[in-house]
Image (cartoon, rainbow, N blue to C red):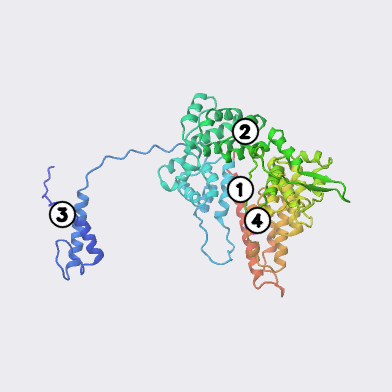
Amino acid sequence: MNRTSTPVDAPAPGVWEELVTAALLGTERRTPPGGTAGREAPVALLDAAALETVRRRAGLRPAPAAERPVPAPDDPRPPLPPAAARRLALLLADRPGTATGGRRGTAPDLMELLPQWLAAANARGFAPPPQVLPALLDAARGRTDLRPAALTFAGPRATWLARLNPDWRFALRATPGGGAALPRPQDEEQTRRLWQEGLFAERVALLGALRSREPAAARELLSTTWSTERAEDRLMFLDSLRTRLGPEDEPFLEQALADRSRNVRATAAELLSALPDSALAERMAVRACACVAVDRTRETPTITVEAPHECDASMERDGVVPKAPAGRGERSWWFGQLVEAAPLRTWSARLGGRTPREIVALPVADDWQSELHGAWCRAAVRQGDAEWARALLGAPSAPEAGGPGAVSLAERAKLLGTLDAAERAGWVAGFIAAHGLSEAFQLLGVCAVPWAEPLGRAVVDALNIARDAGSYPWSFSGVMGLAERCLDPSEASRLDGLLAVPDEHEDASPGAGGYWAEAFQRLVTTLRLRAAMAQELGAGAA
């Protein structure tokens, strides 16, 4: 059917802008275009705006249809069990509370349980429901610590969504190669082409993947372009050799000691010192032994230290940093670097065949003990030497609260990392039993989750002692938060006796009993929730 229409006059240029200006300033100050001032001016303004709106919409020219996005990739993993999917939606819907003050109430902090839930779901190989992916990416956007587990769980669709929404671009940066598929191991030509022509993120991902399965092939691939790489790229690529580091890497790392970049040289030296049989480790051992001896002329054999008087070119080449940090003496700075890079087996032969425990027990002259023992701590961590770590940690009940060699809580935590999970938990449990919770937070952070029974029992007993002493629970909020996430859920039944408000003695802080009852109630509720989460995820396991 044919239709005719009455032509409409074209609008004058800038009419819409004038209407907006009149609306903002008011018709008393600005007369609408084509209208008159007075009481009818506001109505005239609205009529003109309505007409102009229709005119603007009718005047739009049709544009070509946008290209459809590529369909989302399939996720071959099995779907979540329904109960676990509902739980995930609840965890993602939770937001940090807005309550002020130190009182948190008895409700579990669901967002703090999300990392644990993701780890369990990833361990079982489940795929997320598609409808929760936006909320999951939003959560990961706000918490960088959540990103690795969240992106693993989100799977291939995370990068697909990230290309459509700029808010989620972190997924492209966090995913090696931006989610691009890496060549198959047997496709050598494609591997070489990607290494030579790929983006930096793709090359890092390729080298890391190859290093994990074929260390020698990764090293050879890196050597083909090493001399032409930028210094910052060489440093990143060299760091990949930490994976499956072995004696075969020594020639390449020795060459890197002559690199023009100081950071590359330092990293190469660090990696070589982690190989006790390397030539660099032997050179460091010779230098360190020249600085340390046992004085047998004293009533008790005593370690004496004569630190280097200079940092020569050969020491610099082997990774010794010549300039000391502010507040450190140069000689002690050089000495510490030599000792931490020397193989720990050096010291038994140098110090009369003594065991690590006997060596650490020797007195050290002239206030050098802290420097020497601190360097041995760093060496034990770098070389993964559990025997030396035990000697430096000492007995957990020792009066010095951490052993004769550990000079800080941070070093104790690192030394504990060289022990197996059971021994680590047992040592920390003994430390808590002897010294309480005031210094235990950092040590608890290196223990495997869920905590072994002796460690969990020690933490609960220490919290109970603090409650009975009338202290406020706020002083232990960090430990209580760890307990909510790390205590074995089976411990919930043991805590039922702590839920009542205790009688307050005259020395107790006012109201502390009620706060403790509330904190223990939250702990019990959280543990039972974690047990339910594990059961929901296990219901769909193969």
Which residue lies most toward the right here? Answer: 299
Q: Earlier in the sequence, mark 1 or mark 2?
A: 2
Q: Position of residue 208 (x, y in %)?
A: 56, 35
Q: The disc labelled 1 sits on which kind of residue?
A: Gln
Q: Quadrant of the N terminus?
A: top left
Q: Which residue is mark 4?
A: 483
Q: Nearer the viewer, mark 4 or mark 2?
A: 2
Q: Which residue is mark 2?
A: 253
Residue located 81% across and 49% down the image = 361
Q: Nearer the viewer, mark 1 or mark 4?
A: 4
Q: Which residue is mark 3?
A: 12
Q: Is residue 411 left or right of residue 359?
A: left
Q: Earlier in the sequence, mark 3 or mark 4?
A: 3
Q: Position of residue 520 (x, y in %)?
A: 65, 62
Which of these two is toward me, 492 or 415? 415
The numbered dot on residue 103 is none
User: Can residue 278 be spotted in the picture?
Assistant: no
Q: Nearer the viewer, mark 1 or mark 3?
A: 3
Distance Cα–Cα, label 3 vs label 4: 71 Å
Distance Cα–Cα, label 1 vs label 2: 49 Å
- 292 vs 103: above or below: above
The numbered dot on residue 535 is 1
